[in-house]
Image (cartoon, rainbow, N blue to C red):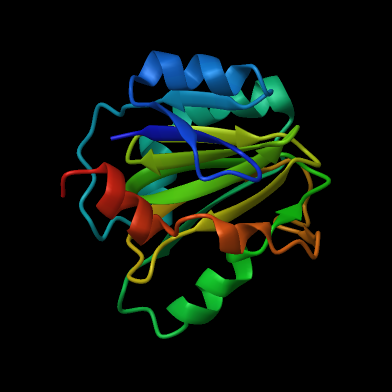
Amino acid sequence: MSLLLVYEENSRQFEKYTGFDEIENCLKNIGVLFERWQTDCVLPVDADSLSVLAAYAPALERLKQDYGFQSVDVIGLTSEHPDKLALRQKFLSEHVHDDFEVRFFVEGRGLFYLHVEGKVYAVLCSQGCLISVPANTAHWFDMGENPFFKAIRLFTTPDGWVAKFTGSGIADRFPSLDELCKQHLEL
């Protein structure tokens, strides 16, 4: 399930969107690509990177052609990962990238927060969601206390993920992935 909450940056009041089309349209207004992908094959939970990339090859090729991506990889994290806390902390602070950030969720979920023009967009991405955060858009990501996701990452530069942290404490004022799910999803 996908979910979008749009907050004023200094308020806990929000607008809630649950329909895929309305989420896609709202995010399009701030330059964010949001798509739903499917594959014709069933991937096992322990599928390796090559199998994942092969399953989504036609869609990935389209993105490479449209945006000039130079590298693609697969990242996955589970609650058993020994560095899960350190990895979570790395992404929880607001930051920007010179490159746009593209993620496709093969399985599991994660929460992107986008800080744009006085608003904060909380985008819950789940299996099948692709999100593209435009270059220089302030954002942060929460994978939760017990992460479970596998995602394809696409980069237009060979350097991959390079963040410039803003130093803002804004991320501390918004619900974590776990809090947001408890408040808005029936689990």
Residue sitting at 20 percent across and 51 percent down? 44
In this rendering, the answer to whether 29 lies above or below 44 is above
Viewer-nearest residue: 77 or 121:
121
In this rendering, the answer to whether 33 lies above or below 22 is below
Residue 148: percent from the left, percent from the top? Answer: 32, 61
Residue sitting at 62 percent across and 27 percent down? 32
Tell me where residue 133 sits by quadrant. top right
Q: Quadrant of the N terminus?
A: top left
Is residue 158 something one can see in this rendering? yes
Residue 55: percent from the left, percent from the top? Answer: 36, 36
Left or right, 154 with respect to 60, comes to right
Going by the picture, which residue comes out furthest to the left?
187
Residue sitting at 65 percent across and 45 percent down? 10
Residue 158: percent from the left, percent from the top? Answer: 77, 52
Left or right, 58 with respect to 148, comes to right
Residue 81: percent from the left, percent from the top? Answer: 38, 79
